[in-house]
Image (tube, grey):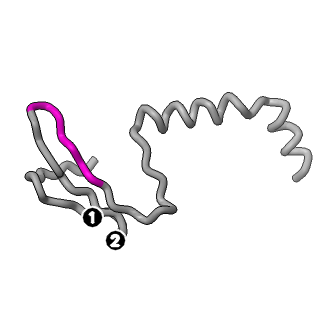
Amino acid sequence: MLTLSRKKGESLVVNNNIEITVLDIRGDQIKIGISAPKEVPIYRKEIYLEIQKANSASVSAEQVDELKKLF
């Protein structure tokens, strides 16, 4: 994991097209802004994990076996 220090108003750039800016710092909370192309999905981690869990649950073993038969 890369660890960087940023102050309010400072940014970092990821993959040449995603900019993350520190907007505000109050106590133990940090408000960030993310500028990215519309095709780049951005989720809070807890939401992302729930989406992954739901996707995994929706694919049953039978469906996987049926897909394997196609190939």
Residue 30 magenta-highlighted: yes
Q: Nearer the viewer, residue 17 or 65?
A: 17
Q: Secondary structure at mark 1?
A: strand
Q: Confirm or deny contact between disc 1 and disc 2 (CB under 8 A).
A: yes
Q: Residue at 43%, 65% (x, y): give it.
A: 37
Counting every numbered tag in the picture gives 2
Residue 52 place in picture, x, y as percent? 57, 36
Q: Nearer the viewer, residue 40 or 62?
A: 40
Q: To which residue does mark 1 refer? A: 13
**Above-or-below relation of 21 to 66:** below
Q: Is residue 27 left or right of residue 71?
A: left
Q: Which residues are magenta?
A: 27-33
**Above-or-below relation of 28 to 23:** above
Q: Residue at 8%, 52% (x, y): give it.
A: 7
Question: Which label number is shown at residue 16?
Answer: 2
Residue 48 place in picture, x, y as percent? 48, 38
Q: Secondary structure at mark 2?
A: loop
- Amino acid carrying label 2: it is Asn
